[in-house]
Amino acid sequence: MFAQTIQNETRSTMTIKLSQSSRNGDDTKPLHEVKTGGCARVVEIEGGKNRIQRLMGLGLTIGSEVEILHHRGKGVVVGLNGNRIAVGHGIAEAIRVEQLESCGD
């Protein structure tokens, strides 16, 4: 899977995303908009270097397929490779996903 990194020097943020050729259209949405029980593939992560490294360290990388286990306030708990990862609303908003019909596609 091909990923590209774009860095905005003025805000010191980075965006890591799948290349356009790897996706069909732009049917993405923030992670927190996927309903409980739904599955999604991570296609873009926006944030500072520390945020992106932390998420990648937890296994939330571009191309990861996650299951939405439940919403916790405005945050989200996702299942990934047998683990549960809780992310707050701000981070869930910075993770863009494409919804999958079922898990494991």
Image (tube, rainbow, N blue to C red):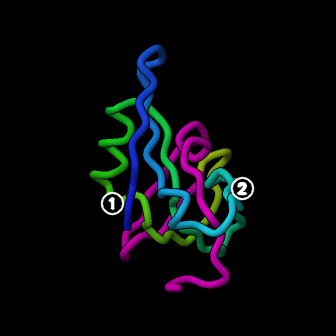
Tally of marks: 2
- Viewer-proximal residue among 35 and 70: 35
Q: Which mark is residue 25?
A: none
Chain-order first, disc 2 or disc 1: 2
Could you tell whether 69 is left or right of 7 in the image? Answer: right
Residue 97 is one of the magenta-drawn residues: yes
Q: Do labels 2 and 1 touch, CB within 8 Å? A: no
Q: Is mark 2 on a helix, strand or loop?
A: helix
Query: Which residue is at 66% across, 53% downward?
Result: 32
| Looking at the image, residue 63 lies above or below residue 28 | below
Residue 41 at x, y = what percent?
A: 53, 67
| Looking at the image, residue 49 lies above or below residue 77 | above
Residue type indicated by callout 2: Glu
> Marks 2 and 1, how far apart in space?
20 Å
Judge the density around disc 2: few (<14), some (14-19), many (≥20) Cα neighbours within 10 Å.
Answer: some
Query: Which residue is at 58% across, 69% downward?
Result: 40
> Residue placed farthest to the top in the image?
10
Q: What stretch is highlighted in magenta?
A: 76-105
Residue type indicated by callout 1: Gly
Q: What element carries label 1?
A: loop
Query: Which residue is at 55% across, 58% downward?
Result: 20
Residue 30 is one of the magenta-drawn residues: no
Q: Which mark is residue 33?
A: 2
Residue tagged 1: 59
